Image: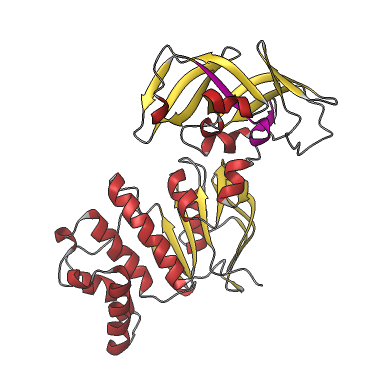
Amino acid sequence: MQPSVSIKDLSLAFGAVKVLEGLDLDIGQGEFLVLLGPSGCGKSTLLNCIAGLLDVSAGQIFIGGKNVTWEQPKDRGIGMVFQSYALYPQMSVERNLSFGLRVAGFKKEDVDHRVARASEILQIESLLKRKPAQLSGGQRQRVAIGRALVRDVDVFLFDEPLSNLDAKLRSDLRVEIKRLHQRLKNTMIYVTHDQIEAMTLADRIAIMKDGVIQQLDTPHVIYNEPVNLYVAGFIGSPSMNFLMGKLSRGKEPKVTVGEVTVPVSGYQFADAQNSADSVVLGIRPEHILVGEMADSVSFSTDAEVELVEPMGSDTLAYTKIGGQAVTVRCDTELGVSTGDKIKIGFDPARGSIFESESGERL
C-alpha cells in the first residue's frame, strides 16, 4: 500500500548548520506517528518541512503519492495544529473555525456543515459564540484542532499541541486526540518532547537526536528493545538503570558489575559476532523484583535501601548493585523504608546490553 506521507533523502540547513540530513521516512495511511525528542533535535523542523513552512535544501516530500516538495502549504492537503493555538482574538469560535473555508471560497452550506461536524466531534457546540479570551486553555486547543478538522484533509500535523496546558488538561486532551484518531482514521503526525504522550498516542514512534532518527518502531519495541543507550535513557520514567560492567562470553555469558556477577545466558544478543567486553547492562526499575519474588529469577543480590520516594500506587527505592546506583519501582504495600536490607533480583533476559563505546545494543 502506498504511504500517506513519504520523505525521501530530506536535508535542511540554515547556513552552515545542518539540521536534517539525508532523512528517509514513510508514514502509512491512517497511521499515528509521533516524532519524539528533546528541544533542538529537529522534530518541529521536520514537521514544518512537511507542512511547507520551511523550504528544504534537498530531497523530496510526497503526500498521498503527490510530490509536494515545492507546493504552497494550502495546496498540500494538510491541517496543522500549533502549540500557541494561533486563534484570531477578535473572532468568535464559529468564525475562527470557518474563516479559512470562507477565504477559500466554500459555499455557506458547506462551511456550516463542516463547522457543525467539527464542533460535534470535539464537543464545543456550546462555545461557538464565545471569543478566545473567554475560553480555557483546553477549550482553545480544541478550537485549534477544530480549525484543522474543518479542512477535511487526509493528513493532520500537530506541533506540541498540549505543552501549554497543565497536567490534568494534558491528560484529558490526550485521550480526546486518541479518540479523534480512532474515529477519523486520518494520518496524524505529532511532535512532542513528552514521552508519555508518545507512548500513549503513537502507532509508531520516531525518536530523534541531532536531526537523525535513532529508532522507528512501535512503543512496545522501543520500550523493551531500545537500539542504543540514547533511546534507552530517553524512554521510561524513572529512567532505565545503567550498570557499567565487563562481558564474558562463552557457554554461560555473564556481566561483572563491580564484585557482582550477573548471568546473562537468557539474553538474546542482537549481534553475536561483536567481541566487545566493556558494556552497559540496562534494566528498567519496574523489572526489578523485591523480597521473595527475587528468588524466582536467575539473578538476585542483597541490597540496602538508601532513599525512598512514595509515589502513591508504588514506591521508588534507591539502592546499589556492585557499588552502582539502582532505582527499584516496587509496590507500596511492601512497606520499604530507608535503611532496610532487602533482596532484589531481575531476569537479565528482560534487560538490555549495550557496547560502552558506541552505545549500540548488543
How are the residues colored? secondary structure
Between 277 and 214, which is closer to the camera in this rendering?
Answer: 277
Between 123 and 283, which is closer to the camera in this rendering?
Answer: 283
Q: Is residue 262 visible?
A: yes
Which quarter of the image is occupied by the N terminus? Answer: bottom right
- 308 vs 293, left or right, is left
Q: Is residue 81 visible?
A: no
Which residue is at 53% across, 21% downward?
326
Which residue is at 50% across, 32% downward?
239
Tally the marks: 0
Residue found at the far front of this picture: 292
Q: Is residue 346 above or below residue 260?
A: below
Image location (x, y in percent) of residue 130:
15, 67
- Residue 169 lies in the magenta-colored region: no
Judged by its main secondary structure, the magenta piece is strand
Image location (x, y in percent) of residue 71:
52, 70
Q: Is residue 305 above or below residue 22?
A: above
Image location (x, y in percent) of residue 31:
54, 64
Between 246 and 159, which is closer to the camera in this rendering?
Answer: 246
Which quarter of the image is occupied by the C terminus? Answer: top right
Image location (x, y in percent) of residue 75:
47, 74
Q: Is residue 53 above or below residue 240?
A: below
In the rendered image, which quarter is residue 66 located in?
Answer: bottom right
Which residue is at 39% across, 23% downward?
335
Q: Magenta part of the protein: which range?
A: 342-355
Which residue is at 33% across, 80% downward?
114
In the rendered image, which quarter is residue 104 located in?
Answer: bottom left
In the rendered image, which quarter is residue 345 located in?
Answer: top right
- 290 vs 114, left or right, is right
